[in-house]
Amino acid sequence: MCLLLALVGCASVQELRDRRIAENQALFDSFPAEIQEQVRQGQVEVGFNADMVRLAWGPPDQVFTRTSRDRHATVWGYTRVRHYPYTDRMSIPVYFLDSEGRRHISFHSVWINSETREEYTVARVEFVAGRVSAFEQLQTDDGYGF
């Protein structure tokens, strides 16, 4: 099981997409050729249904319900995680007994390794009546964050 998790963790976005397509080949084959190519490329378009989005981008990390005056929508959220490792110093108490059996405390400075974890949204897809009505992607310096 650990090996499987390690392999999945190392798989590229394209490899994961190819795996989803292979696991749902009959569904994928039912899409028109133009949509098949878009899904293979990881593209989502207005008018796609949930199955098309799921094959292109995977299952959502979050699902929201958006209600406005004139419509009801479901919004899928996709997130990523950034890790910020850092090393810091801290003092720790060390208790000891002296030669007469009295308890003493001394503080020693030690280095610790830690990490801050930040989850951020890279894409949202809005569905109205089962079809994509809008979507947004995080734009980064090197293209899109998704």
Image: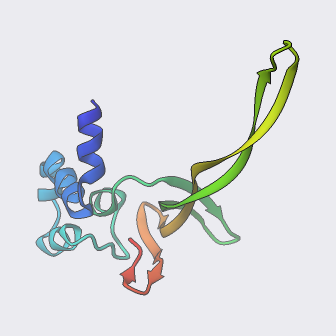
Q: Residue furthest top?
A: 101
Q: Is residue 141 above or below residue 121?
A: below
Colouring scheme, one of rainbow, by chain, secondary structure, one colour: rainbow
Name the residue at 88% across, 16% down: 102
Q: Quadrant of the image for the N terminus?
A: top left
Q: Is residue 34 above or below residue 102?
A: below
Q: Position of residue 142 (x, y in %)?
A: 37, 84
Name the residue at 23% across, 54% down: 11
Picture mark count? 0
Name the residue at 21% across, 72% down: 41
Q: Give the left or right position of residue 125, taking residue 89 as reference.
A: left
Q: Position of residue 77 (x, y in %)?
A: 50, 61
Q: Position of residue 130 (x, y in %)?
A: 42, 60
Q: Position of residue 19 (x, y in %)?
A: 18, 51
Q: Give the left or right position of residue 94, taking residue 15 as reference.
A: right
Q: Quadrant of residue 54?
A: bottom left
Q: Give the left or right position of residue 3, taking residue 91 as reference.
A: left
Q: Quadrant of the image for the C terminus?
A: bottom left
Q: Is residue 119 above or below residue 1?
A: below
Name the residue at 28% across, 63% down: 56
Task: Name the foreground residue: 106 vs 124.
Answer: 106
Task: Name the foreground residue: 16 vs 63.
Answer: 16
Q: Residue furthest front?
A: 99
Task: Name the foreground residue: 114 vs 12.
Answer: 114
Q: Quadrant of residue 131?
A: bottom left
